[in-house]
């Protein structure tokens, strides 16, 4: 059984008090016992010092041995009386001291519980603050007020660490925003130049072939950058949450993926029921787009992709395609890992789709589960906390 620190401190306080009380009771008992007179010696002394106790009127009918017998009987009666008194006094001392010790131990336990709770309050404040921390709530601080002791030092150290974390997260946010602009701008310029070269009627076939390859390479680089930026954005948490209709987002994604499904001869089967979650609409759309595009790409002609929202789980995407062993599924959620290879391949993917899906789900307080589909492919379930519409 696991005991809390407060309980352990209370037990230690109460145990030490009880031990000290037992030692005090033993010392008190020995002192009182040493001060009470010995029954036999006390009786003999009293009879010797007070012979009148057994004295009788002088009569010729009482022999001298009768007086001695009377003295012995008096001594025995006095010894018995003193022995009973001594035992009664010691028993009363033990009983009353034991009751007082038990009551005092109970009071010590209660005061120990209160004192331990007061002493550990800063630790509870630190724990509560740490549990509530997130990328969107790094402004929380403990601000412990109290004497300059070890707990005050611990709370101040924790607040200083939060200041450094908040500064690091701010720097990361600025870096992601700047990187998004600085990386996309040259790629957009490059794509424009290549498209201009392709539109030139005087371009030779070799130049057109080279321009087409450069255009595909640029598109691939753009997808890679978009995936990395989405992964970085979701990994740092959500700056805010708003109600998002997941079924409407899924409808837009399916409409935008229709041409790709027609090109690869994969049917899209929407089963969209109203579902509202709290989160970031852009990241949730990226999650859905990655799942749907992966399900279409890793499929086979004549296959299908089913997208369900609003059920027991917020989102379920099932597709046909090559069979995937259950042991290989965890590796698919790692960056740059894909079924059958660890790097990118010729279908245009960059190996970040499911990594982004998992990161976005975790940023929203949800989780992703994947299992082999009943008709090949995968069945991916995304659980997200729902929100009132």
Image (cartoon, grey):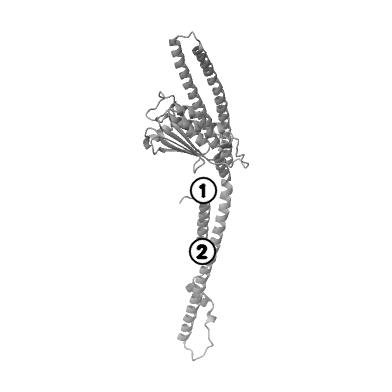
Residue 184 location (% of width, % of height): 53, 21
User: Mark 1 falls on what kind of element?
Assistant: helix
Q: Observer-nearest residue: 90 or 5?
A: 5
| Near-viewer residue (160 or 25) | 160
The residue identified by callout 2 is: 29
For image coordinates 58% across by 50% down, the residue present is 115
Along the line of sight, which residue is nearer the eye, 215 or 32?
Answer: 215
| Disc 1: CA contacts within 10 A as few (<14), some (14-19) or many (>=20) | few
- Label 1, on which residue? 5
Tell me where residue 239 sits by quadrant.
top right
Helix, strand, or loop for circle 2? Answer: helix
- The x, y position of residue 6, in whole percent, is 53, 49
- Mark before the other along the chain sequence, 1 or 2: 1
Q: How far apart are marks 1 and 2 (CA)?
A: 36 Å
In-front residue for pair 288/175: 288
10 Å crowding of disc 2: few (<14), some (14-19), many (20+): some
Name which residue lies at 46% across and 19% down.
216
Tell me if residue 286 can be seen.
Answer: no
Farthest right residue?
145
């Amino acid at each position: 059984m696991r005991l809390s620190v407060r309980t352990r401190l209370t037990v230690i306080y109460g145990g030490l008090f009880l031990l000290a009380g037992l030692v005090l009771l033993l010392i008190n008992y020995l002192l009182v016992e040493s001060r009470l007179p010995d029954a036999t010696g006390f009786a003999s002394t009293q009879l010797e010092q007070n012979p009148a106790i057994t004295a009788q009127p002088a009569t010729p009918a009482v022999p001298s041995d009768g007086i001695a017998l009377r003295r012995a009987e008096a001594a025995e009666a006095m010894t018995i009386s003193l022995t009973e008194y001594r035992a009664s006094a010691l028993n009363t001392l033990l009983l009353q001291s034991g009751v007082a010790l038990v009551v005092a131990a109970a009071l010590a336990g209660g005061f120990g519980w209160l004192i331990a709770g007061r002493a550990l309050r800063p630790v509870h404040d630190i724990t509560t603050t740490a549990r509530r921390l997130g990328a969107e709530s790094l402004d929380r601080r403990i601000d412990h007020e109290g004497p300059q002791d070890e707990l005050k030092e611990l709370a101040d150290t924790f607040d200083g660490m939060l200041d450094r974390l908040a500064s690091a997260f701010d720097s990361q946010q600025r870096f992601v925003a700047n990187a998004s602009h600085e990386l996309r701008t040259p790629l957009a310029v490059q794509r424009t130049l290549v498209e201009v070269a392709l539109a030139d009627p005087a371009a030779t076939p070799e130049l057109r072939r080279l321009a087409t390859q450069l255009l595909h390479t640029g598109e691939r680089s753009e997808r890679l950058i978009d995936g990395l930026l989405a992964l970085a954005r979701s990994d740092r948490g959500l700056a805010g949450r708003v109600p998002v209709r997941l079924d409407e987002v899924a409808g837009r994604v399916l409409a935008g993926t229709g041409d790709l499904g027609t090109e690869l001869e994969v049917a899209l089967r929407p089963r969209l029921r109203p579902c509202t979650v709290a989160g970031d609409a852009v990241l949730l759309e990226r999650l859905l787009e990655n799942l749907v595009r992966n399900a279409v790409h890793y499929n086979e002609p004549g296959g299908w992709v089913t997208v369900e929202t609003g059920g027991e789980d917020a989102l379920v995407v099932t597709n046909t395609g090559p069979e995937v062993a259950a042991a290989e599924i965890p590796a698919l959620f790692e960056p740059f890992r894909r079924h059958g290879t660890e790097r990118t391949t010729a279908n245009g993917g960059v190996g970040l789709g499911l990594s982004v899906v998992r990161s976005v789900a975790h940023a929203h307080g949800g989780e992703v589960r994947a299992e082999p589909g009943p008709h090949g492919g995968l069945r991916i379930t995304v659980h997200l906390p729902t929100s009132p519409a």
